[in-house]
Image: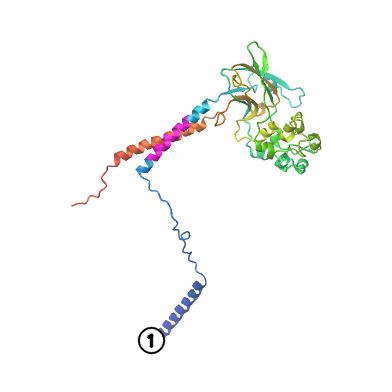
Amino acid sequence: MITAMMASSYNAKEEDGHHSGAAGHGGAGADKSRKPDNTAFKQQRLPAWQPILTAGTVLPAFFVIGLIFIPIGIGLYVTSNNIKEFEIDYTGVDSKSECYACARNFSWNSTTPCTCSMNFTLEQPFESNVFMYYGLSNFYQNHRRYVKSRDDSQLNGDPTALKDPSKECEPYRTSEGLPIAPCGAIANSLFNDTLELHYVDSNGTKVEIPLVKKGIAWWTDKHVKFRNPNGNTNLTVAFQGTSKPVNWGKPVYELDPLDPENNGFINEDFIVWMRTAALPTFRKLYRIIQKKSSTTPTLPSGRYILSITYNYPVLSFDGRKRMILSTISWMGGKNPFLGIAYITVGSICFFLGVVLLIIHHKYDNRNTSADIPN
């Protein structure tokens, strides 16, 4: 009797606990439900395309890619090979080189520039406009600290940055207590060799080839990123109170004093150099040889003389210097890589298409029906 009463009391308490717990859960659920909204996005019911790869779709794709890429690659490769290019190294490493003495006896403190000349022959004439580049090797313009060593506000003509350059320019920020303009390691290492080209005619007479020094920089650099302080008038006053870079022989306002539109921070040789290269072996545009007549080539075949004012040392870091003459096409300068890449990808796709076609033909007729034993 006593046992029955205890059991009924325990059951009553258990039921009360269940009821109170259910009421508590029901109240919390009534306030806010954690169930996601019944939308296509939250319930992952968005329409999707799930392609089923079969031999009938994959094989034609491989063949089409191959048949498209291979002709494009051949066209790009042939176009690149049709671009004429001539390169001559004038570093002066070889003792037989005309520039050997200049390379070995170079001195930053020398007041008399060293000059040398290189003779070369063009076997084929160069038609249309010819672009003259200078090339450097083993020169790491992509070094992190080198790339950061500049003040873009100063180069944009900001008077405040002109007098107080960025600390990123250290150790080429100040010189003799004056701020350097332009500051930084990039500007301090400006390429300053002077190159001149002469053609030797059949009579042995030297004819100077006119070189155009404007139009070699990007338009956005020339007209947006680089500006002189206070405009292009009286740059001597505008740069007063500043110092030239340590390795420069003259201040920035004397880069081209005869042409105000090519002097100071907007000098195009300076602008071209300030656009750093991504690889240690690079070339930068130096001059343009414009075609003057439609009947005669820009550079006829024959003997030429490259006259060099040797101002830029490279032997200290095992570098090399060279001069490049090149024509261009609709795809730019000479670069066979793109054509080779297209041909390679197209050939691989075509080869895979053939292999997969053979495999499909060999195993497509296999018996796929289930064998039911008797």
Q: What residue type is labelled 1?
A: Ala
Q: Which of 62 and 102 is in front in this view?
A: 62
From the viewer's perspective, is residue 40 above or below residue 184?
A: below
Locate residue 299: give its quadrant.
top right
Label 1 CA crowd tier, 10 Å (few <14, some 14–19, many 20+): few
Magenta span has 70?
yes
Q: Is residue 353 visible?
A: yes
Residue 316 left/right relative to 6: right
Residue 282 left/right relative to 169: left
Query: In the orientation shown, which residue stands out farthest toward the top?
Result: 203
From the viewer's perspective, is residue 32 above or below residue 16?
A: above
- Colour treatment of the image: rainbow
Q: Residue drawn 36% across and 45% down? A: 54
Quarter in which the N terminus is drawn: bottom left
Residue 289: x, y in percent? Answer: 64, 24
Q: Residue drawn 47% across and 33% down? A: 72
Q: Residue drawn 52% across and 28% down? A: 80
Label 1 SS: helix
Magenta span has 348?
no
Locate residue 271: give its quadrant.
top right
Q: Give the range drawn in magenta.
A: 60-74
Residue 152 left/right relative to 28: right
Question: Magenta region, mostly helix, strand or loop?
Answer: helix
Residue 370: x, y in percent? Answer: 25, 50
Q: Which of 99 and 308 is in front in this view?
A: 308
Residue 189: x, y in percent? Answer: 69, 32
Write down the residue under mark 1. Answer: 4
